[in-house]
Amino acid sequence: MKREAYAAARTITPRLHAYFARHREEAVAAGQHCVAALPDPETIEALIDVAFWASLRREEGYSPKISLALLAPDETPHPLLLERPLPLGPDALTRVAPAVERPGIHLGVSRQQGELLVWGTTRTIPLLSFVLEVSAPGVLVIKHHKGEESRKFINVAVLEGDLIKVIDQSASTIPASVKARVQLAVSMRAHGRGGSLLVVPAGTDIWRKSIVQPISYEVSPPFRELAELTRTQEPHDHTIAAIAGLTAVDGAVVLTNEYELLAFGAKIARRKGSPQVEQVMLTEPIEGARPLFVHPEQLGGTRHLSAAQFIHDQRDAVALVASQDGRFTVFEWSRSDSIVHAHRVDVLLI
């Protein structure tokens, strides 16, 4: 029986094709080498359609998580080639998914003699290769890597069922005050339990006025390994994971803006004499999205309300909140609007 077409695939394909065509033209004009070939709209639509239906299947109780890259075997060094390429379809993707779940591995897909086939796997892809990740049931992410930073990707669009989110590239960066903490954000989101991270100014204890005393898990002396690594080199993944893992404990992790760990399991309380926060400005880096003014509980419950209250009372701080459902929000005080700004950035972290 012929399956129903995934309507969002046809809707988003022209915009995706135009995006990759424009950026490819700019890359070639700038003298970039090893730029991926531009896939045709029919191929893009077919890949999205198959990936969506595969995402809704389960293999031995597991939902597939797959990264698909549109490229030919001769576009990548050291490809792992299947003797008999697989016809691209939900069944094939679901069966092979467990072999390619680890980060950095892509299933290579190309059109051969008019048919889309999975030819094998690769770890290396050229600039502007069309990459589609099956992140969760019904959730697809279209992305490409940044060129010289081959491990870092730019998200172009996120599809959640019939909801299409095209990333606004002019507003797609995490706020400058937390830009260096992206790895922590990704690691917080990955453990799946939800959590809060409070980034407070170094050299002051004023943040304690918004925390229930005594703190159950205060760190003394402050843990400085991440601070030292940040000054000298790229932070180690295991250090990032160790600190992000603390956010799974009930309460918030407290980190200075110089990356010194002060406490975890900290309970947020309204600062004495401060009014209760009633409204926040919510933004998301999505094309066409406008700021919404909502009660903080509408963002996800108690954890978000506490973070909003903390920023309302501690206006030089930043709060990062991960929900159990994968949503991620950065709270800051907006001095121009005199309101707590909640910037939802999970579309950048998937």
Image (cartoon, rainbow, N blue to C red):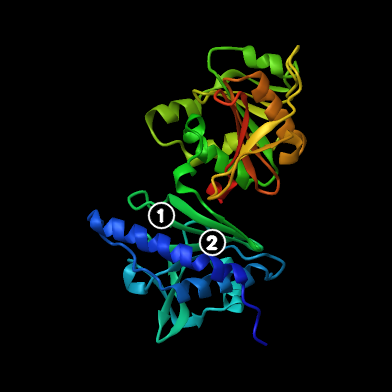
State the image quarter where residue 50 is shown: bottom right
- Other-residue count near label 2 (Cα within 10 Å), few / some / many at <14 / 14–19 / ≥20: many
Name the amino acid type tagged 1. Answer: His
Q: Pick the residue in front: 263 or 2.
A: 2
Q: Closest to the observer: 127 or 104?
A: 127
Of residue 224 and residue 22, the one placed in the foreground of this image is 22
User: Distance between the Cα atoms at labels 1 and 2?
Assistant: 13 Å
In this rendering, the answer to whether 246 lies above or below 141 is above
Disc 1 + disc 2, Cβ < 8 Å = no
Q: Relative to residue 40, is residue 338 drawn left or right? A: right
Residue beneath disc 2: 133
Residue at the spot 67% in from the left edge and 68% down from the top edge: 56
Which numbered disc, 1 or 2, marks the residue that appears first in the sequence? 2
Which element type, helix, strand or loop, lies under badge 1? strand
> Element at badge 2?
strand
Residue drawn at the location 62% of the way across and 65% of the way down = 64
Name the residue that disc number 1 marks. Answer: 145
Image quadrant assignment for residue 164: bottom right
Horizontal and vertical percent for residue 94? 61, 72
